[in-house]
Image (tube, rainbow, N blue to C red):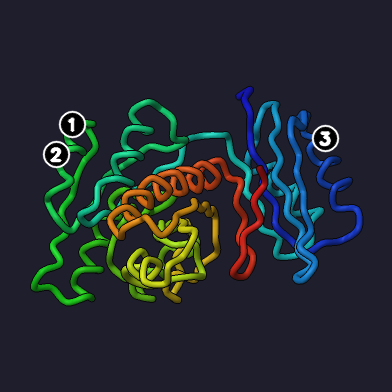
């Protein structure tokens, strides 16, 4: 199959890695189109993202790279293809509708498998754009029951990533453990400022001069996962709380879309609680 393929490598840094990798690609008749690499000095970790062309034998190329790289290297080799995502929502529509429209016009490198919500209100927009909407009731259910039902629904789709598009519930360590570095959240503040609930109100009460949004991977520590994308805008004393919220909605959409673009194009690596992102 002649196409544009992708190789991602994360391993301990050693002298001569690029030469070894290039040699394997050459021996497999691949042409390197783009190669970006970085060494994170604190952990002595080497990262590489390589776009290549040529007939791809995934198993063979993976094995030969593994043979020349340090032990425990993390290697992915695959054709460029759209990722599968499931979106979780509560009541707010702005992030969801933005993603649905981008998906409708083929602007996401993804297939939205389903939207799962805790309220019925966002079902109509999903139906209009032919995206399955599933309701997982949370009322009169324990956290364990709710998350068990949620996981059951998600498992049916086996997504590459789960997107929290203003999903206003805290997920338990039990749930998060099944999707390490696979859950992407949009938080309505420029983290680490104003974590938790009602960040716009917190920002308004402090009289801040900038507000922002942060997209990050979800971990067991609230709003403290590896950051993928952040943006800010200026505000002033004339902004009421509702003005901040309205302005914030626009930046939330932009930040979430930017984060998904990077993740869905395999540009993001995670090391400890940080990210390495190749543009």
Point out the frontmost of discs 1 and 3: 1
How many residues crowd around disc 1 within 10 Å: few (fewer than 14), some, or many (20 or more)?
A: few
**Tag count:** 3
In whole angstroms, how far apart are the C-alphas of marks 1 and 3?
50 Å
How many residues crowd around disc 3 within 10 Å: few (fewer than 14), some, or many (20 or more)?
A: few
Name the residue tied to disc 2.
124
Q: Position of residue 207 (x, y in %)?
A: 42, 67
The disc, 1 or 3, on the residue closer to the chain's N-terminal end is: 3
Question: In front here: 3 or 147?
Answer: 147
Question: In front here: 255 or 233?
Answer: 233
The disc, 3 or 2, on the residue closer to the chain's N-terminal end is: 3
Tell whether label 1 touches label 2 (CB within 8 Å): yes
In whole angstroms, how far apart are the C-alphas of marks 3 and 2?
53 Å
Question: In front here: 199 or 278?
Answer: 199
The single residue placed furthest to the right in the displayed view is 15
In whole angstroms, how far apart are the C-alphas of marks 2 and 1?
6 Å
- Picture quarter with the C terminus: top right
- Picture quarter with the N terminus: top right
Name the residue tied to disc 1.
128
Name the residue tied to disc 3.
27
Q: Residue at x 37, y 49 (%)?
A: 247
Q: Position of residue 154 (x, y in %)?
A: 29, 55
Q: Quadrant of residue 54?
A: top right
For label 3, the SS is helix
For label 2, the SS is helix
For label 1, the SS is helix
Q: Residue at x 12, y 51 (%)?
A: 120
Vertical comparison of 106 with 221: above or below: above
Q: Position of residue 197 (x, y in %)?
A: 32, 71
Q: Position of residue 62 (x, y in %)?
A: 68, 47
């Amino acid at each position: 199959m002649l196409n544009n393929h992708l190789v991602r490598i994360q391993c301990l840094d050693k002298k001569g890695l690029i030469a070894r990798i290039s040699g394997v690609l050459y021996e497999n008749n691949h042409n390197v189109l783009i190669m970006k690499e970085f060494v994170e000095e604190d952990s002595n970790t080497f990262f590489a993202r390589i776009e290549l062309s040529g007939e791809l034998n995934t198993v063979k190329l993976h094995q030969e790279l593994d043979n020349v790289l340090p032990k425990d290297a993390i290697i992915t080799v695959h054709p460029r293809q759209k990722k599968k995502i499931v979106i979780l929502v509560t009541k707010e529509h702005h992030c969801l509708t933005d993603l649905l429209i981008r998906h409708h016009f083929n602007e996401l490198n993804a297939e939205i498998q389903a939207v799962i919500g805790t309220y019925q209100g966002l079902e109509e927009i999903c139906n209009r754009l032919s995206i399955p909407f599933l309701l997982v009731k949370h009322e009169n259910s324990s956290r364990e029951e709710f998350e068990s039902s949620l996981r059951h629904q998600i498992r049916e789709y086996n997504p590459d990533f789960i997107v929290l598009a203003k999903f206003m519930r805290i997920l338990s360590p039990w749930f998060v453990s099944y999707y390490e570095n696979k859950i992407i959240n949009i938080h309505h503040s420029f983290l680490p400022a104003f974590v938790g609930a009602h960040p716009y109100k917190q920002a308004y009460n402090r009289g801040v001069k900038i507000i922002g949004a942060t997209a990050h991977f979800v971990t067991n520590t609230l709003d403290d996962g590896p950051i993928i994308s952040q943006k800010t805008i200026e505000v002033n004393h004339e902004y009421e709380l509702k003005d901040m919220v309205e302005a914030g909605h626009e930046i939330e959409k932009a930040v979430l879309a930017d984060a998904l673009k990077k993740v869905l194009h395999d540009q993001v690596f995670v090391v400890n609680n940080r990210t390495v992102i190749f543009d």
